Amino acid sequence: MRWPSIVLALLVVVLQYPLWIGKGGWLRVWEVEKQLTASREANRRLEQRNSSLEAEVRDLKTGYEAVEERARFELGFTRADEVFVQTPQTR
């Protein structure tokens, strides 16, 4: 009676191995799901970045306000009728 139990238990282990550890097993599925979640999150962040860059390009193409703002803050430009006053920052 002991041998059939051992053989049956061994057969169950052999049949369960591919289900849990094999190429299409549950452990591999969990790993791929984690990778998929990480990829979706990265894609979401990149889509947000792309949409903000697209809006900025659209603003630069259609109006002068965005160009003027960029020239003021990045390059320090002023208009002809403006006076530039620089104050030192105290720490």
Image (cartoon, rainbow, N blue to C red):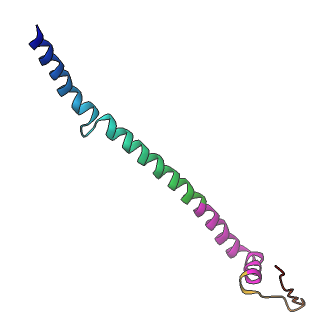
Q: Quadrant of the N terminus?
A: top left
Q: Residue furthest bottom?
A: 80
Residue 32 left/right relative to 43:
left
In the image, 91 versus 24, the foreground residue is 91
Tell me if residue 52 is in the magenta stretch: yes
Q: Position of residue 71 (x, y in %)?
A: 74, 83
Q: Quadrant of the C terminus?
A: bottom right
Residue ID at (22%, 33%): 18
Residue 49 left/right relative to 16:
right
- The residues colored magenta run 49-73
Q: How many marks?
A: 0
In the image, 51 versus 44, the foreground residue is 44
Residue ID at (20%, 25%): 13
Where is 12 relative to 38, above or below? above
Tell me if residue 74 is in the magenta stretch: no
Magenta stretch, main secondary structure, is helix
Residue 11 left/right relative to 38:
left
Q: Quadrant of residue 82?
A: bottom right
